[in-house]
Image (tube, rainbow, N blue to C red):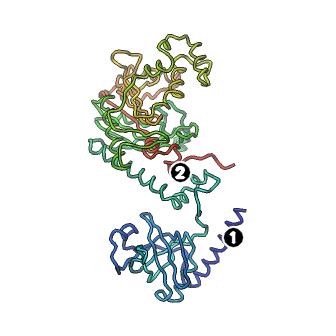
């Protein structure tokens, strides 16, 4: 039924397009010279000022010998007024053939209606693009909720709040860059197609490089290349770009995601804490209006200093002070009693981390630095000086999500080799990275910030698809 209605609407619009062509209006025009965008016209409003504007018709209200309509461009909306006496009979009759969704260009004079609405009285108009399919009238009422993501362009047209969210995302990324530039960081680009997928533990996407007859990988992280730049003498670098991980779709995971990675020579995890506090609070204040953000039922306070708590303390608070002395079989049983699915082959560390990720992490609503993680979980970080079983790192948790891991980076090539080989379990490691470290990498702090998750928190959106313009979706059946 819906498809039949769509075809009927399309047939009617095609008929209107033919009639418009009969009036001399080509359905798909070229560039149009504007006085300014609609927001600028409204800001600089003066009675009787002549303007030239362009936009999409979003409402049409016919009143016999006159028509009020609204047009919208990327900056906002403005009312326009077509009058038969002013336009002439032919131009007015042609205007009546326009449909909601059509793009038009207008020349006219500004005036204010009796209702106090700034309006453009049309003197001339031209068709710029004919819309052959109708826009949704009540987009929120669509039963297919995924249609908002599959046809994001309609979502942006129909829902100004969605457009505003993505405007804020763009502004936030600009502020992130500005903040880092002011701190003396240099933005760089590293390969997104790599011969080895390194820098994180994740399943990569595999592609084929035909010219070299070899498999390549879309990167899972830029870390190993950014550290090469530290070896090369760049003291402060960052990269803001895409990573790819061949893993599941969920409310917090998209296989293609935006990551900010930052490295600073002669710094450490403490320097990264100060940097991320400053960066996030700066974006929250400048783009989202303050340090209090609502996320679901929670009000999150981003005002620093943020809480710090060791990983081990969170585990023992949940599982008891004797947890680390519990035999692994008992640990598996206790984890299963929490409702967790535990693989019988998992050791104590893996069981413990499953408890952390599935039951503890989601309770960390206010900004929290979880510190001193087990060394076996983080092979690219330095050990804590007082306990080699822990590494000098943090995981920043906000609203129950990991937003940013930060490290005192490993720069000992001998120890790094041991760690990577242990993680690889017999698979090859990145020998070129080890060679770079052997040329001397300065002590450094490093950090990654998941931009999509950060945007979720700051905007109060509880699904990652809401903050990505074109999220990955399952194919239609």
- Which residue occupies the extreme front position in the image? 115
> In the rendered image, which quarter is residue 364 located in?
top left
Q: Position of residue 181 (x, y in %)?
A: 29, 45
Residue 470: numbered disc: 2
Task: Name the residue: 50% across, 14% down.
Answer: 323
Q: Position of residue 358 (x, y in %)?
A: 54, 28
Mark before the other along the chain sequence, 2 or 1: 1
The front one of 235 and 211 is: 235
Q: Mark 1 points at which residue?
A: 8
Say whether marks 2 and 1 touch (CB < 8 Å): no
Of tags 2 and 1, the one toward the viewer is 1
In the rendered image, the quadrant that contains the N terminus is: bottom right
Q: Position of residue 405 (x, y in %)?
A: 41, 32
Q: Where is residue 82 in the image (x, y as percent from the top left)?
A: 49, 81
Task: Name the residue: 67% across, 72% down.
Answer: 11
Gap between marks 2 and 1, in whole Å?
Answer: 29 Å
**Crowdedness near tag 2: few (<14), some (14–19) or many (≥20) residues, C-alpha within 10 Å:** some
Q: Can residue 258 be seen in this view?
A: no
């Amino acid at each position: 039924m819906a498809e039949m209605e769509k075809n009927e609407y399309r047939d009617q619009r095609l008929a209107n397009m033919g009639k418009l062509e009969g009036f001399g209006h080509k359905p798909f025009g070229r560039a149009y010279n504007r006085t300014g965008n609609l927001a600028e016209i409204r800001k600089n409003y003066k009675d009787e000022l002549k303007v030239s504007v362009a936009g999409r018709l979003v409402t049409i209200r016919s009143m016999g010998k006159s028509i009020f309509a609204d047009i919208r461009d990327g900056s906002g909306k403005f009312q326009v007024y077509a009058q038969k006496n002013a336009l002439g009979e032919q131009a007015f009759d042609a205007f009546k053939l326009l449909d909601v969704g059509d793009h038009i260009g207008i020349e006219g004079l500004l005036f204010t209606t009796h209702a106090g609405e700034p309006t453009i009285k049309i003197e001339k108009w031209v068709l710029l693009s004919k819309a052959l399919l109708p826009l949704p009238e009540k987009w929120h009422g669509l039963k297919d909720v995924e249609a908002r993501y599959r046809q994001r362009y309609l979502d942006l047209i129909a829902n100004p709040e969605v457009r505003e969210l993505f405007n804020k995302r763009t502004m936030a990324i600009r502020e992130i860059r500005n903040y880092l530039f002011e701190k003396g960081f240099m933005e760089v680009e590293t390969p997104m197609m790599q011969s080895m997928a390194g820098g994180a533990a994740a399943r990569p996407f595999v592609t084929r490089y035909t010219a070299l007859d070899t498999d390549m990988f879309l990167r899972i992280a830029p870390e190993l290349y950014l550290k090469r730049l530290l070896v090369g003498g760049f003291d402060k670098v960052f990269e803001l770009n895409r990573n790819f991980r061949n893993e599941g779709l969920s409310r917090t995971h998209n296989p293609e995601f935006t990551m900010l990675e930052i490295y600073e020579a002669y710094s450490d995890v403490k320097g990264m804490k100060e940097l991320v506090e400053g960066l996030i609070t700066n974006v929250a204040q400048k783009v989202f209006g303050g340090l209090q953000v609502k996320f679901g039922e929670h009000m999150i306070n981003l005002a620093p200093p943020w809480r710090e708590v060791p990983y081990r303390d969170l585990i023992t608070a949940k599982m008891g002070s004797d947890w680390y002395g519990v035999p692994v079989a008992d640990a598996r049983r206790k984890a299963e009693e929490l409702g967790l699915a535990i693989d019988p082959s998992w050791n104590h560390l893996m069981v413990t981390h499953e408890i952390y990720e599935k039951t503890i992490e989601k309770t960390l609503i206010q900004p929290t630095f979880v510190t001193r993680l087990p060394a076996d979980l983080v092979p690219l970080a330095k050990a804590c000086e007082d306990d080699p079983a822990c590494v000098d790192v943090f995981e920043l948790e906000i609203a129950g999500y990991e937003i940013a891991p930060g490290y005192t980076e490993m720069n000992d090539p001998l120890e790094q080799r041991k760690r990577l080989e242990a993680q690889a379990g017999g698979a090859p490691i990145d020998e070129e990275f080890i060679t770079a470290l052997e040329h001397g990498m300065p002590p450094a702090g490093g950090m990654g910030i998941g931009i999509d998750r950060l945007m979720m928190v700051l905007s109060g959106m509880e699904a990652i698809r809401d903050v990505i313009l074109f999220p990955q979706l399952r194919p239609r059946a």
